[in-house]
Amino acid sequence: MDAVDATVERLRAQCLSRGVSGIRSLARFFRRLDQDGSRALDARELRWGLAELGMLLDEAEAEGVCKRWDRDGSGTLDLEEFLRALRPPMSQAREAVIAAAFAKLDRSGDGVVTVDDLRGVYSGRAHPKVQSGEWREDDVLRCFLDTFDSSEKDGQVTLAEFQDYYSGLSASVDTDEEFVAMMTRAWQL
């Protein structure tokens, strides 16, 4: 484990010890750290906020954490990047049910879900915009697929992107049993 990973683990533990475990609590914490109201944290704001929690980082460490968490290359951390970094890892039971749902969607078995895969599993014909003629069925399927796609909507969802989507949801479900039951019902597994 490198220094940045160790910092992340310390921050996660610190947040959890203060009851900052749910998404709402983490979002509130993020907004408090965002001193300039930009809806993004720079290394200075992150360093200030961590110091408030008793985690003293030098400037280079704070910049290292920001770089590690900054997925879009903006040089700052938006709320989604911040939440993604602080979410606790998922249990094997949660990862397994997510993988089962993904496998159901990935009809071709190539590790990527596309609109072609969805056509074999879901129908968009009953969608109101299809009924009105505004959209084609493929438009509905693409919109559905975009829900799970990363910030770069390329029409292909990998297992990693699917897991990333559900890791956010997982953080708001207390027990493995509840999460597995929810996924099983939602995906008819």
Image (tube, grey):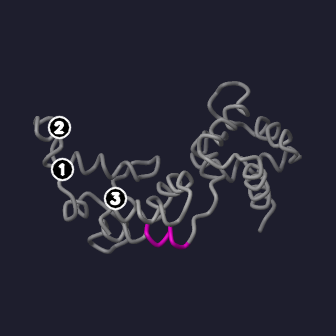
Q: Using the numbered discs, state the Cα–Cα distance from disc 3 to disc 1 in whole angstroms.
A: 17 Å
Please provide percent x and percent y for residue 109.
32, 74
Q: How many marks?
A: 3
Residue, x 57% and y 64% (percent of image)?
A: 90
Report the amino acid beneath label 2.
Lys
The reply to whether the C-beta atoms of the residues labelled 2 and 1 are less than 8 Å apart is no
Q: Using the numbered discs, state the Cα–Cα distance from disc 2 to disc 3 in whole angstroms.
A: 23 Å
Identify the element where label 3 is drawn.
Answer: helix
Residue, x 61% and y 47% (percent of image)?
A: 22
Q: Name the residue under label 1.
A: 124
Q: Name the residue under label 3.
A: 186
Please provide percent x and percent y for residue 127.
18, 43
Vertical order, 6 against 150 (above or below): below
The reply to whether the C-beta atoms of the residues labelled 2 and 3 are less than 8 Å apart is no
Between 78 and 183, the one lying in front of the other is: 183
Residue numbers of the magenta segment: 92-98
For the residues carrying marks 2 and 3, which lies nearer the camera in this image?
3
Q: Mark 2 points at which residue?
A: 129
Question: Along the polypeptide, which appears first: circle 2 or circle 3?
Answer: 2
Is residue 57 at least partly visible in the picture? no
Please provide percent x and percent y for residue 134.
15, 35
Task: Looking at this view, name the residue that lies furthest to the top.
Answer: 36
Between 6 and 15, the one lying in front of the other is: 15
Please provide percent x and percent y for residue 137.
16, 48
Left or right, residue 162 beside residue 32: left
Question: Along the polypeptide, which appears first: circle 3 or circle 1?
Answer: 1
Residue, x 15% and y 44% (percent of image)?
A: 136
Between 43 and 22, the one lying in front of the other is: 22
